[in-house]
Amino acid sequence: MKRTLQRSWLIFIIVIAFLIGMAFLIVETIFGASDWVDKPYNGHIAGAGGLQEAGVISDRTGNVLAQTVKNKRVYNKDADVRKALLHVVGDDSLNISTSIQSQFRSQLIGYNFIWGLDLPESFRGGRDVNLTVDADTCKTAYNALKDYDSGACVIYNYKTGEVICDVSVKTYDPVDPPKITKNNEKEYDGVYLDNVVSSTYTPGSIFKIVTAAAAIENIPDIWERTWTCEGKKEIDGGDVTCVEAHGTVNLKQAFGHSCNIVFAELAVELGEDVMTKTAKKMGINASFKISGIDTKAGHYDVSKATKHQLAWSGVGQYEDKVNPMQMAILCGAIANGGTPVNPYLVDGSSGSMLKDLGITGTNSKGKELLSSDTAESVKGLMRYAVENDYGDDMFGGLKVCAKTGTGETLISDEDGNDKNDGWMVGFSTDDDAPLAFACIVRGSSQYGYSTAGQVAKVAMIQAAESLKKEKD
């Protein structure tokens, strides 16, 4: 009797395990089948990474970025456009995991859950993918970035969410991909990463946007206060240095002059808890999703920092890290009164059924990153920085709010020159060009204004011109 009972329990457990396994298989088949087809190890299904019969990828103006001609994947005829959009479009190898050809492979090759790869011709239009990027703007940004070690430029419409520019370097021509060996792997280190979404960098002074927001929300007399900058100040036994002695300044002047002393003192006064809470609310430690692609989360953690290290964290040093897309979203949130519109790369009209119904990509709001009052105050600081420090004519007539930064990486080249992270982030307030941007340049001893600022300048001007042409 006892043995019979034991066998009954064993059979019961096996049946339950079988049913759970079947349920899991059914769920995975329904919701994950297209992911199986997308995997690079299934490249044999159509050769050349499974893309020999893939649909067309085009930019927002209909400019073809990739298509199949006679069973061969063909890319845009302009080499600069191909290199500029390599990380967005991808190549035959599928080594760039965040690219459209990797992420949307099942749609491009015509896979359907019911029909598999034998999708009827009436549905074949669904293989095409329309992107929100503008090839001309991406080419302009690429030409401004290409001579640096690495970097990125992202611009998006903070009212609609459309990503206009997504450019990353290092890059290569998908028509002639490099053969990476032990002898040249250093030269191509990071070449498969889209730095816009997959990399983080030392922010330097662009992090003062976060420290300023924390001060505005937590120090009642912040606008009446003044500080004295003598170019250096000892905090907790260590020096915090500034590029020059700014004298007596208020918050607006300190932000415009990018005074390290003021923002270091503010970080210490605000303390670990307030700085951490503000950084988290503003999305520094968060990952964002861009058309199904996850951005790399930034990093702000001062839980083990000394007061001296906390001070440096307030000016974007210590262990601070931020992601370019993340910073563009934060700037878009400031422009939108504290709440961002989620960026997207793939137009919602991609796919035959949606396209036939006239359904297009829609904007969706993200989580609030700042209160509306704080956003308005930070916007004023960023506007002041452009008007009084960068020059209001910098962006060719666009009314821009911005902040530059130079993150010290402690990395040098063979000649001993610094390889800093130069930044410029911000947004334009023009009704015809509601654009938020973030540009990062690595590998220069110059300040962010001279490197990333010049990339942002030409890319923003081109983006605004492209939007104007579309409306005309």
Image (cartoon, rainbow, N blue to C red):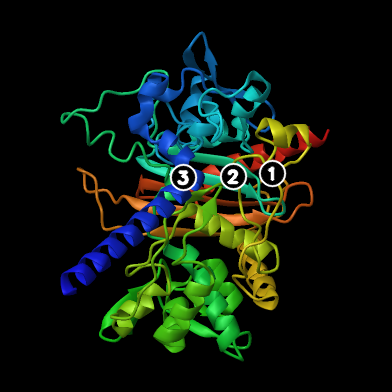
Q: Which residue is under mark 2?
A: 457
Q: Residue furthest bottom?
A: 220
Of 385 and 178, the residue lying toward us: 178
Which residue is rendered at x = 17% and y = 74% of the image?
Answer: 2
Q: Residue furthest front?
A: 1
Q: Is residue 355 visible?
A: yes
In the displayed structure, 294 sits above or below 89; it is below
In the displayed structure, 404 sits above or below 102; it is below
Kind of residue at badge 3: Gly
Number of residues whose C-alpha sits closer than 10 Å to that of mark 1, classed few (under 14), some (14–19) or many (20 or more): few
Say whether marks 2 and 1 touch (CB < 8 Å): yes
Kind of residue at badge 2: Lys
Q: Is residue 402 visible?
A: no
Kind of residue at badge 1: Gly
Which residue is rendered at x = 38% and y = 73% of the image?
Answer: 313
Of 19 and 468, the residue lying toward us: 19
Q: Quadrant of the C terminus?
A: top right
Q: Disc 2 versus disc 1: distance between alpha carbons? A: 8 Å
**Secondary element at tag 3:** helix
Q: Quadrant of the N terminus?
A: bottom left
Residue 154 at x, y percent in the picture: 54, 46
Q: Which residue is under mark 1?
A: 396
Q: Which residue is under mark 3?
A: 32
Which residue is rendered at x = 46% and y = 53% of the image?
Answer: 295
Determine the image quadrant of residue 470. top right
Q: Answer with mark 1 or mark 3, whichever residue precedes in sequence.
A: 3
Residue 91 at x, y percent in the picture: 43, 27
Of 303 and 258, the residue lying toward us: 303
